[in-house]
Every structure is written in structure tokens, then in C-alpha cells.
Image: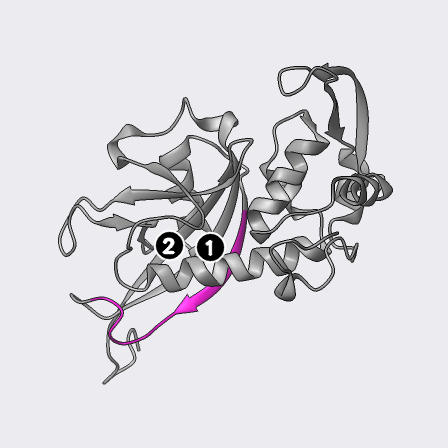
């Protein structure tokens, strides 16, 4: 028997919610859809899974075609399977969250996709159920980043504590006390202080740091409890 009889055929796709940090705020990468339906409207990056691929392989291919990069942090988010989610054919989509250092790849972006970075909380209307995907990805990112050093994946090779604080404030859409934030992040022992400073942001300057990769990899799945109660943070919250 080569096929299950009397079963409905459907399409299988992947969609990638790609987050990046530009040094000021968290952003979402969107493309203008190049075919009908919804041609010209804003969409997540995605594609159909080929016969020889797993969902993970398809998502990696989509990201590689867009950015030219291998080894991007990627995690399966959720399967979206509403019968009415696609207006053409019954299509099930597995969504993936990807984290990218914008500076690493901006020269490699495939121009054929007409991709644009938008602030995470101010992006245009999206096709199908892509807004639902983005909202769920934001919620999961906030929860996981509160417990794990996940957001360090978004940073360049060297960065300052103020830059790291801007990243966390952008993700949680809140503000953190400067002193408390610095003490908390340094207490993780995941950062190595460098000998040079960023003197563009202030006269005094801010020390650059890099990630201690050995400790980072060892602690990635450890519960650091970096941000308490991420779901109830207030606009003027403190860390």
C-alpha cells in the first residue's frame, strides 16, 4: 500500500518569525509577498516543505536563502492548522522563531525578497494568521528570555551593558533601573569585560563586553530567573 485511502491531501509549509536587534530596539523582518493571493502585502518569510525535507530543514533553507547565513538560532514555535488559514488550499504551517544579529548579515540580505525591518511593536498588517504567529513568538520570547540568556544571540561580538539593557527594554516594552540591571546581568558571570570603551554614546564611555561562550553554553538551559514575572511588568518596572 503506497497511500492511505480516502484521506484528504494538504500542503505543508513553514513560516519564520525573524527577530533582530539593531543596537536600539528589537525588530521584526517582513517581506512583501510576491504572488497571489495577497500579492504585495506584508508577510513573514516562509515557504512550502519539499518532499525530501523535514520541517527543520525547510526552515533552515528559507533562512539561508534570505540571509546567506548558516547556524542561525532557530526554535520551533507552534503548528498552525486552522482549515481556513489559507484562502487557496488547505495548508498547515509550522512556525519557527529565529534570532539574528542584524549587523552580521545586513550586507547579505537577498534583495529579491524586498525585506524590511520593522519595530516589533509597530509593524504593518500581515496576511493570513501571521499576526497571531508574531504575537505568540513575542510572548514565548519574553517568557524564555526571563529564564535563559537567550537574548545574547541578538548581540554583536562586543557590546555594552547599556546596549544590552536597551535590548531587554525593547523586548519587554518597559524600562529597567540602570544600576539594578547592571548588577543583575554581571552576576550571571556570562560576560567578559574588554579593554576598550564605546565613547560615542557619552563622554565617560561604556565598557565593552563579550560573551563567555563556554559559560553561556553550559548555562543556556539553566534557570537564571533574570527577569521576574515577565507577564506582569509595568511600564516603569524595575529589575
Residue 72 placement, left or right of 13: right
Q: Is residue 166 magenta?
A: no
Q: Which region shows up in magenta? A: 74-86
Q: As rendered, which of 140 and 62 lies closer to the eye?
A: 140
| SS for callout 2 | strand
Q: Which circle's residue, 2 or 1, is located before the other in the chain?
A: 2
Please give the residue where the numbered disc 1 appears in the rendered image: 96
At x 35%, y 72%, the residue is 81
Compute the Cα span from label 2 to label 1. 6 Å
Q: Is residue 221 above or below residue 206?
A: below
Q: Is residue 78 magenta?
A: yes
Looking at the rendering, which quadrant does residue 215 occupy? top right
Q: Residues within 10 Å of mark 2 (few under 14, many from 20)?
A: many
Residue 47 placement, left or right of 209: left
Please give the residue where the numbered disc 2 appears in the rendered image: 15
Count of numbered labels shown in the rendering: 2
Amino acid at each position: 500500500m503506497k497511500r492511505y485511502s480516502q484521506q484528504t491531501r494538504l500542503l505543508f509549509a513553514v513560516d519564520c518569525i525573524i527577530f533582530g536587534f539593531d543596537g536600539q530596539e528589537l525588530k521584526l523582518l517582513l517581506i512583501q509577498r510576491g504572488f497571489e493571493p495577497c500579492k504585495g502585502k506584508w508577510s513573514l518569510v516562509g515557504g512550502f516543505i519539499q518532499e525530501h525535507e523535514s520541517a527543520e530543514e525547510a526552515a533552515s533553507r528559507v533562512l539561508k536563502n534570505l540571509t546567506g547565513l548558516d547556524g542561525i538560532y532557530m526554535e520551533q514555535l507552534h503548528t498552525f492548522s486552522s482549515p481556513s488559514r489559507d484562502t487557496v488550499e488547505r495548508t498547515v504551517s509550522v512556525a519557527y522563531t529565529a534570532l539574528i544579529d542584524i549587523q552580521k548579515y545586513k550586507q547579505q540580505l537577498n534583495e529579491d525578497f524586498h525585506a524590511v525591518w520593522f519595530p516589533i511593536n509597530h509593524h504593518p498588517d500581515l496576511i493570513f494568521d501571521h499576526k497571531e504567529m508574531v504575537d505568540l513568538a513575542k510572548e514565548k520570547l519574553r517568557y524564555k528570555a526571563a529564564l535563559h540568556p537567550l537574548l545574547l544571540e541578538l548581540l554583536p561580538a562586543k557590546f555594552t551593558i547599556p546596549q544590552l539593557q536597551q535590548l531587554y527594554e525593547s523586548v519587554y516594552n518597559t524600562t529597567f533601573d540602570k544600576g539594578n540591571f547592571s548588577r543583575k546581568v554581571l552576576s550571571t558571570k556570562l560576560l567578559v569585560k574588554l579593554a576598550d570603551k564605546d565613547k560615542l554614546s557619552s563622554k565617560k564611555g561604556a565598557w565593552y563586553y563579550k560573551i563567555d561562550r563556554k559559560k553561556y553554553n553550559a548555562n543556556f538551559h539553566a534557570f537564571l530567573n533574570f527577569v521576574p514575572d515577565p507577564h506582569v511588568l509595568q511600564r516603569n518596572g524595575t529589575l
